Image (spheres, rainbow, N blue to C red):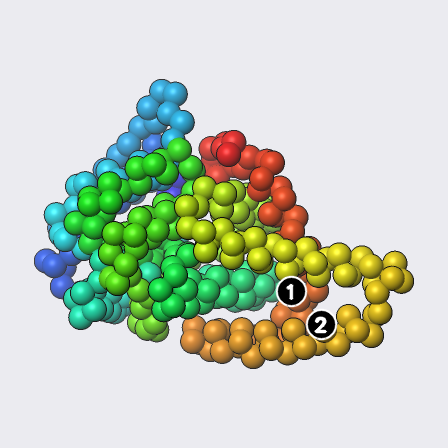
Amino acid sequence: NEQKNIPRLMDSLSALSYPRDRFEIIIVDDDSQDDTVLILEQYIARFDNLKCIRLQDPPGFQGSFKKRALTKGIEAAVFPVIVTSDADCQYQPGWIYQLARAMKSRDSMMLSGPVIYHSGEGFSMMLNIELSCLVAVGAVSMHLGRPNMCNGANLAFRKEAFMQVEGYRDFQHIASGDDEFLLYKVFQKFPNQVGFLKDTDAVVTTDPPQSWRQLLNQRIRWGGKWKEHRSFVTRMLALFIFSFHLIFCAVLVLTLSGVYSWQLLLVQWLLKTSIEYFLVRTLLNFYNRSLPVKWFLLMQTLYSIYVVLVAIIAQVKGFNWKNRQYHE
């Protein structure tokens, strides 16, 4: 049900600088109930490199709808390199060119690219801080040879690699994680051919969650897959991050109860905040975004509580995503 995003998506794709005879656009409509298909039909006549695949929900299907849709699109692709993205994304004109150039020059089997939210004001600014940090963690992990996360909104891989690792097999029952689980499988097969493309021309922008409810459902969807990871490093990193924020919340409670020194907490908070401010500012500079101090400080105050609550809820509660209810 992406009818509101299709015109913007197609306008962005039409502005790509890559020669049209060297790439195809495959849009998989996953049983939309709106006018997505009708709108797409208007573009097919204008784009000779556009094809649409329409899927319907099979009765009693219990797996991942997105992985099913992606698999159908990949199977239909005629070119050797696949690039995945989402309907609410927009691109730099040189996006495909930079990915293709890097895939060839590095002899890569998979490359992840940078992603940021369209808007950078208010609530979206705090989300941009979080997303930029997640992208950075994924980039550093790849650089260290221990990849743990990537973003399917900006992901390139060879169709050959996808077929050799049998796509999403073994993870088809999990609603999310099409990007991270595929990253894990490709890395296991081709450990020296996975990387991150740090290039401003390769940045993809996407829509932020539009409400607290949508944010919570999205983060539950993200958080619920950690226990399915087969990478020990990824599982331990998630556990470390959760423990760090849980300890901070516990210390905050102890401080308010008079058990812990508020002076010591203040010193620790200032040290942590100062270091993270310079790191986050550097990350956002890459995206040509500023870092308002007030939003950063607000996030520093609330983020640990948010992480702990989402992590706990993700283990016990299902979520609603794209008008479908999941119970993982």
Residue 13 in the figure: left or right of residue 306: left
Task: Name which residue type carries label 1.
Answer: Met
Evaluate whether residue 165 shows in this view. Answer: yes
Which residue is farthest right? 258
Amino acid carrying label 2: it is: Trp
- For the residue labelled by badge 2, is the local secondary structure a helix, a strand or a loop? helix
Distance (Cα) linking label 1 and label 2: 13 Å
- Vertical arrangement, residue 171 with respect to residue 149, above or below: above
Q: Residue at x 34, y 71 (%)?
A: 198
Q: Looking at the picture, how far across and down is residue 127, in whole percent?
A: 55, 60
Secondary structure under the numbered disc 1 in the rendered image: helix
Q: Residue at x 89, y 62 (%)?
A: 258
Report the disc number at residue 171.
Answer: none
Give the quadrant of residue 296.
bottom right
- What label does residue 299 carry, if any? 1
Q: Say which mark, if any, is on residue 269.
A: 2
